[in-house]
Image: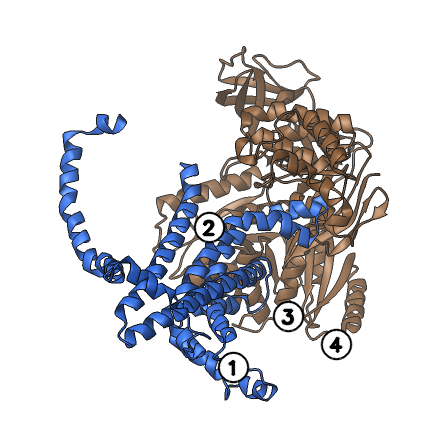
Chain colours: A brown, B blue
Amino acid sequence: MSIVLERLTKRFGNQLVVDRVSLEVADHELFVLLGASGSGKSTVLRHIAGLVQADSGRILLHGQDVTAFTPQERGVGFVFQNYSIFRHMSVAENIEFGLKIRKMAAAERAKQRDHLLDLVGLAGLGGRYAHQLSGGQQQHVALARALAYQPKVLLLDEPFAALDVKIRGQLRRSLKQIQRQLGVTTILVTHDQEEAFELADRIGVMDRGQLIEVGAPEVLYARPQALFTATFLGAGMVLIRRKEADVAQFGSLRLPLPPDAPGEKGSRVQVLFRPEQVVLSQDAPPSGTQTVGQGMVIEQTFTGAQRRVRLRLPHLSGTRQIAPSAPFGEEGLLVDALQSSSETVTAESVWVSLRGWHMLSPPQPRVLLCQPSAGVPNGTALTRYLAHQLDASVMMLGIDANGENSDGLRNVLLERQREAELAADVRVRHGDPVEQIASEQAEVLYDLLVLPTSKRPNQLDPLVAQVLERMNRFWSTPVLIANNDHSRIKSVLICTAAGEPGKSDVRVGGRLARRLGAKVTLLYVTAEPGAVRPEARTHLERAAATLRALEVDGSVETRTAATPTEGILAEAREGNYDLVVLGSHGPQARSVFGRDDVTFQVASNTDHSLLVVPEEAL
Amino acid sequence: MRAVALETPRRRSERSAALIPVSMLVLVLLPLLLLPLAAVFIFAFRGGVSAFVNALRTPDAQFALRFSLLVAFATAVINAILGTFAAYVLSKYRFPGERPLGIVVNLPVAIPTVVVGTSLLLLWGPIGLLGRWLEPWGLQPMFTPVGVLLAHLFVTFPYMLGTLKPLLDELETTYEEAAYTIGANRWQTFRYVLLPALRGGLFTGALLTFAHSLGEFGATVLVSGNLRLRTQTAPLYIFAQFEAGNIATANAIAAVLAILSFLIFFFLLRYTGKPNERRH
């Protein structure tokens, strides 16, 4: 193995930028790290070069542990995105720089330099300076300079990003050819999927500091494991539902499951199909075909060799569409199909069937149960119920404020967990509770935070107040404020206003209700009796449609009250709900309203458990 | 040719419209800038060329000119080194107190030079904070050439820093990182990658420092004691001759200083103008 990374981890401040990345790159391999900007891929590369020191983890180059080495000692070749050609040195001097540092004799240096100039196709241009070269030539100089001293590995950070799109293709081929010719183990970082497909022996897909999945380009495209890979690499449609026996039944669509399909009966199944796997036909397909249904053509786009057709199909029962994410208020299913551009779809309504599909392995959601105090109730019963319903893993986080009795607290939590028969990991941190919750959340990226409170009448638990204040600024995870420890949620109240706080509360609340099998009431509060503003009506209709698409039993309730808070509190008191769902304003609104906004007022005055959904929640 | 083609009636009227403000500006600048400079040369050569040359020939004048050039040269060299070091540290390292330190090193521009002279006396002088302890050892920097040099280093320190730090800040760190990955250590990186990139700045900064040192008066007059043939710089000599009523002698030296300054200014203009021309 030329390059081995073992659980590489790096934080910048509180932000986890590289999260336990482990990777092995074989000799002579061209490995591509692919991810959106900010996914941590460049940071991984800089770790290998020694330009960044890891917080934990190991780096091995050709079997040698280089984690503690300086960049100079590592002997890797690095090509920067801006090429960083030394401007006062000629091309020849740039290439010879590494050899001069290594005190190679002048004659030998010249020979090596000419060989490299030849290799990268710049023979005769050794006397030029950076500003006399084109972008592509500069890239080749940077490449030759990095290869001059025969580096152990070659690292390239977005080497094509600064170039004109038209010449990229040609330069890619020349890079691949040079890499093949020298056989130098290479890692290339890019955000360009096409580039990754064309160059890579294997691709590693990165998202939010984690290496999500590694595989050959064809495998990652056709048979990805993770949802992120499926949607990041190319267009496609992902449907999700619970698994039954050996078929996945999405409404009328029956897909036989391979015998080794992951998950037990009742667990979630995610199915991916790509636009090129969608078949459109005028007539009903013969039986035995995997038919999705009959759809309306809503858009056709000519893209050259191919034509993209977007169709709207009726909702499939028991199914939710993950990608492409449906617009708010969209009940049906949106399907993209790729046709040869010589075929035009003239009919408005066509049959949609599949010629191929692929099962993903759905990830387990993660729940963080905060245990800031030894107080009762502690939320374990509620969390166990949620974990069971959501197939989620649970982390119990104890916070020892002054760091004096961490072991004692850990034992209390372990005991608590045994008593509640809650399968959870236990972790104890010390320091300020809010800071510690924020750190834990930033490090692991939980899907739900459960915060049991010690509720006093008409008063907000100070910790809850702090968490609410920070949540929009620092995390986009819903927070469940557990004012009681009920182990059953069958009735959910979603409080909505016209567009404000927003849509994420309906989406997240609706999805939770779907998983819990709960019924949902949508509440709209108005100051004047009977007056529902037109935009509010539209919003309510869309919210109801979103719930119908989730197949949640939902109804709409309108209340008249002086303030939204009063209306919400009255409805919650009278309606016998198990959970109240509220949106949360963005950070700007929070700074304007302070603790006087609806979320704070409701949180201070209700005895119900409260799910607060930040606007950015997915 | 193109200019002729563009010469439309409108442009011509624009040009005549410019006549009034331009001549007004020249009229204002004449007594403020241009005439005083001319006066120096007129007075210097009033007694003819021979009187001018004789004025420069006196041992005092010779010493003052040579001493000034020597001090200016030493100041430029020492501050080039110190300024480069300061710019490197301030640009490349992040540390608590970075901002206050950045302000302090630029302070000499804002402090009146007389105040600088006073502070140096209060520190190094015979009854000064440090000078008090040095006196018994026979070390007394004030009223010696060393004192003059100290004052000039102080007063001109920000010029070098001011030209180099922006250059270092602007140079992307990837150039250094590239040198590191190639195998160059910190010193080699500085020597082969950073320093060549600073060449232009070093030249500009050194000329600026030299020019300011050549003309320095306020701090010098206090710390030098104005001792002829020992610590008397050219500006001090001019002042002394003026006070003694030897206006022609004073003007001869003043003319030499003015010519030197013109030369330096000319170099600066050419050198800093160059990259702009290349860009166009």
Label 1 residue SS: helix
Q: Nearer the viewer, residue A367 or A106?
A: A106
Q: Which residue is mark 4?
A: A404
Residue B153's label in the rendered image is none
The amino acid type of the residue labelled 4 equals: Glu
Category of crowding for the residue at label 1, using alpha-carbon neighbours closer than 10 angstroms: few (below 14), some (14–19), many (at least 20) = many
Give a yes or no on whether discs 3 and 1 share a subunit: no
The amino acid type of the residue labelled 1 equals: Trp
Category of crowding for the residue at label 2, using alpha-carbon neighbours closer than 10 angstroms: few (below 14), some (14–19), many (at least 20) = some
Which residue is painted at 46% across and 81% down in the image?
B121
**Does the rendering let one see residue A319?**
no
- Residue A577: image location, x then y, percent: 57, 57
Horizontal arrangement in the rendering, residue B248 relative to residue A477 (left or right): left
Instruction: Give the alpha-carbon distance from disc 4 to disc 2, as whole Å.
Output: 51 Å
> Number of marks in the image?
4
Chain letter of the residue carrying label 4: A
Instruction: Give the alpha-carbon distance from disc 3 to disc 4, as whole Å.
Output: 13 Å
Place residue A87 in its image quadrant.
top right
Q: Nearer the viewer, mark 3 or mark 1?
A: 1
Asked if marks 3 and 4 touch (Cβ < 8 Å), the reply is no
- Residue A68: image location, x then y, percent: 78, 54
Label 3 residue SS: loop
Give a yes or no on whether discs 3 and 4 share a subunit: yes
Q: Which residue is mark 3?
A: A432
Chain letter of the residue carrying label 1: B
Asked if marks 2 and 3 touch (Cβ < 8 Å), the reply is no
Residue A557's label in the rendered image is 2
Horizontal arrangement in the rendering, residue A506 relative to residue A240 (left or right): left
Q: Which residue is mark 1?
A: B124
